[in-house]
Image (spheres, grey):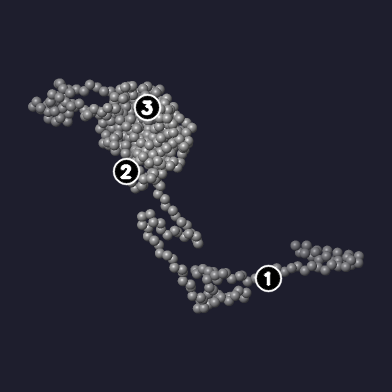
Amino acid sequence: MNGSSKAVPSVALLFAGLALAAGVPAQPQQPVPDAPTPQAPTALPGGPVTPGIGAGEASSSSAASPSAPAQPSASEAAPPQPAPAQPPAVQPSGDQQTTPPQVGNAAVATFILNVNEVVVPVTVKDSKGNPVAGLTWRDFTVYENNRREDIKVFSVDPAALSIAFVIDQTLPSNIMAEVNQSMGAIQGALTPYDEAAVFSYTHFTTEWTGFTGAQSARLPAVLALAKSSGTDPTVPITGGNPFADCSITKNGGCPDPNLQTNRSTGGPFTPIPKEVHALNDAILKAAKELSTRPKEYRRIIYVVSDGKEYGSKATLKEVVRYLQTNNIAVYATLVGDSARWGEGWLDRFHLPFEMYDNILYKYTAATGGEMLAERGTNSMERSYAKISAEARNQYTLVYLSHESIYDGKYRSINVVVDRPQKEVVVTAKPGYYPSAQQYK
């Protein structure tokens, strides 16, 4: 480093001597500019920043900058100006809007609009039972309580299904075997966007799984667990020894009827125990689970049963009202004796003091669903795909009801299609009960 620093002036003198010898005048050396002079910082608009106080007036102990303007002392500070008076907040009463919140210097208005939105899925078929496609919103007219409503939204897009399968395990063993074989086709009728839950019932209802992905590995495993052997009806014994009378006697009498066969009291006649088919309770349990699903899904209960009902705690009227309140449709595959031609129609007639032989048609008619009577495994499998496709590919009509949202009375719905009545069959829910839950 020392050697290099001494060599620099020697080289400079050498070049300077050569320049003088050649008669070239030496160029004056350019002065090196100095660094900029430090400037005093500009005063903050609100005064210097003091730790613990923030931007404000300078303290008396701090020295003022020579270039900064003198700051007034605390005693000479101008008195604070009073804040402008704000109007008092108005307490809301009913639908009155409160004072809008302030964001910076701008007021943001909040609008609350109560909307009574009603969604009506509609199926249109021709006289042969085939779906009618290509209809537009101009072809539909909706009436609520005999008053025409304007259609606000019209859609033909397929909807994702939230479907609850309810399987009757009180069927005869031969019919139950066909149902067990057909259950493998249930998953093939669904899409990856659907979700499904599985229920079964005898004299009580069993939930095998909550709602899970329709194409998950869980669904076929649960359907396999839901299979049953069914029931084998036998000839009841109502009298005679030793079956109906007391099998355990004391002094020729029955010590405890609860210990006897058929709980006999030793008389000549023993009442025949009635069969229990808790269909209403099963549909109600599935409906309660469906009511919690998002409203973007189309809520469906799919029942595989012969339609018999006896022994439920819930009544048909109560369950139908719950379904109509929560926008749930019931579809069914009718099996067993009720699926026979002619006999299924006769089963709709109820004899006093007897069980209902078929009430599924009442559920489907009250909720806008459909029931197919099928016999045999292949027919059952086709019905799963047919009903699932029909429920997914419906026309969707949305209108705003003219009735008050606080009115809990039943409202009738009538959907009319601009086609001759002999050419098309329109299926939609006949009415509903309003609920604040569907407006969330």
Alpha carbons under labels 3 and 1: distance apart? 96 Å
Q: Nearer the viewer, mark 1 or mark 2?
A: 2
Left or right of 96? Residue 42 is: right
Q: Does residue 336 lie above or below 15 as drawn?
A: above
Give 370 or 169, whichever is nearer the viewer. 370
Q: Nearer the viewer, mark 3 or mark 1?
A: 3
Q: Does residue 411 lie above or below 176 as drawn?
A: below
Picture disc at residue 249: none
Give 225 or 9, whichever is nearer the viewer. 225
Left or right of 74? Residue 198 is: left
* Residue, disc 1: 37
| Identity, as a three-letter code, of the amino acid under mark 2 | Lys
Q: Quadrant of residue 207?
A: top left
Q: Please identify the residue farthest to the right as the structure is shown.
A: 22
Point out the tag, 3 or 2, that comes first from the N-terminus. 3
SS assignment at label 3: strand
* Residue, disc 3: 372
Picture disc at residue 409: 2
Determine whether label 1 and label 2 are within 8 Å by CB.
no
